[in-house]
Amino acid sequence: MANTTVRGALAIHGQNPQYLVETVIRNRIYEDPYWKEHCFALTAETLIDKAIELKAIGGVYGNNKPTEFMCLLLKLLQIQPEKEILLEYLQAEEFKYLRALAVMYIRMTFRAVEVYEILEPLLKDFRKIRYRNSGGYHLTFMDEFVDQLLRDERVCDIILPRLTKRDVLEDNGEIGPRKSRLLDAMEGKEEEGSERGRSRSRSPDRSPSR
Amino acid sequence: KEAEVPDVDDTDGLDPEGEFEAWRLRELARIKRDKEEAVARELEREEIERRRALPEEQRLKEDLEHAEKTRQDKPKGQQK
């Protein structure tokens, strides 16, 4: 029972959201002590405390042991919090691993246009994060992680759902060209005000880079 | 057993300028990569349009030349 998806969950990409984590890893998670001891009966609120304690992102390590990050990701898929809650997770500026978790979840479950709109502003978050895999811990950065999520098929040892390519969405007029704060700054355009106005649909971005 | 401490330091703000500079380089690399991909896509589109405009026999000639060229470039087998 503890491993069933919440009742009334919407199918994501046409299937049970938990199946987005492939079977082998999912079964490993169900057997993992961290899952059993710490993830049991978590809600969208209590999950925050666990996510804050995360020390690294990553998929599996050692003998295919899932990371705590992976366990919490599956938990999110299982309880399927509302979109607003996910966006709140992103806002919590000081907890980077909570943000990383939310970013990963959003990439896996949201529509392509939303993924680009929500994730791209985070490309300017250059904080360090630990990445754990079988080789131990590595240092990476939030912007690199987000960039991987937007481009790669496989991140943190799981296959991500297919994401429509950015140029296709641009050709269909569903999304504007990507804006980079750096490029704007280099071209000397100090149009902070107008950018605020245009990016109203995005999550308000507060970042140390400003 | 779970008490192992990660050996990588993820503290931010130890070297704000260096961290920003590193990000700037990463961001520039991303912008450059995206630009190059856009250019490549554009080139491909132009090539397709050019070939569509060509008459059939000329296109066939081009294809045969291309096929001949790739055949030449292929390393010869070293059967002994």
Image (cartoon, helix red, strand yellow):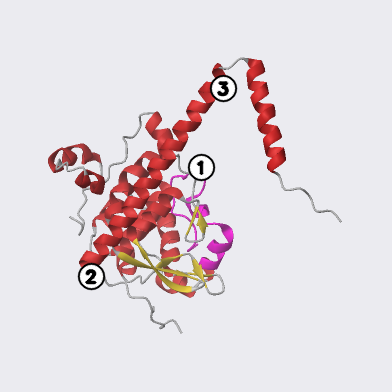
Amino acid tagged 1: Gly
Please provide percent x and percent y for residue A7: 44, 51
Q: Nearer the viewer, mark 2 or mark 1?
A: 2
Residue that protrudes farthest toward the top in the picture: B55
Residue density around tag 2, few if under 14, some if 14–19, many if 20 or more, within 10 Å: few
A175 vs A105, nearest the viewer: A175
Q: Secondary structure at mark 2?
A: loop
Q: How many discs mark residues in the rendered view?
A: 3
The residue shown at (33%, 34%) is A175
The amino acid type found where label 3 is placed reads: Arg
Name the amino acid type tagged 2.
Answer: Asp
Q: Chain of mark 3?
A: B
A22 is within the stretch colored magenta: yes
Q: Which residue is mark 3?
A: B51
Please state the horizontal and vertical placement of residue A11, each as a whole percent of the image. Answer: 47, 45
For discs 1 and 3, the disc positioned in front in the rendered view: 3
The residue that mark 2 highlights is B15
Rounded to the nearest angstrom, the CA distance separating label 2 from label 3 is 54 Å
Q: Position of residue B20 (x, y in %)?
A: 24, 61
Segment colored magenta: A1-29
